[in-house]
Image (cartoon, rainbow, N blue to C red):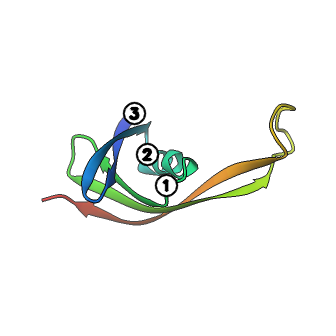
Amino acid sequence: MSKKYFVLMEGGNDTSQVFASKQPRGAALKAASRGETDIHLRERGTSRVHVFNGWREQVAKPANGPAWLPDKVWKANVKKLRVDHLD
């Protein structure tokens, strides 16, 4: 499986933000970790737009985390809502 590119959309238009991932969920998690909540990702080369609801929360660092990691870290979460098709 090869890498795919997903363009973040706002208000129906592409932005300059592009996320690379094998699956749309991976790209959505990257967008959510940057604070995006209403995530529309257009898959390059297709007419598919993957729509996610994203949020992030502060959680305690994992037990096996490195010493330089702060005690609280941001954890991204996404929920897939639907796939839209552009005309």
- Which residue: 38% across, 40% down? 17
Q: Which residue is mark 3?
A: 3
Q: Earlier in the sequence, mark 1 or mark 3?
A: 3
Q: Which mark is residue 69?
A: none
Q: Amino acid at mark 2?
A: Gln
Q: Nearer the viewer, residue 17 or 6?
A: 17
Q: Secondary structure at mark 1?
A: loop
- Which residue: 49% across, 60% down? 37
Q: Secondary structure at mark 2?
A: loop
12 versus 2 height, above or below: below
**Image spot of residue 70 (x, y percent):** 82, 41
81 versus 19 height, above or below: below
Residue 27 left/right relative to 75: left
Q: Which residue is mark 2?
A: 23
**Cα distance, mark 1 to mark 3?**
22 Å
Q: Secondary structure at mark 3?
A: loop
60 versus 83 height, above or below: above
Q: Which residue is mark 1?
A: 36
Q: Amino acid at mark 1?
A: Glu
**Image spot of residue 62 (x, y percent):** 81, 46
**Cα distance, mark 2 to mark 1?**
18 Å
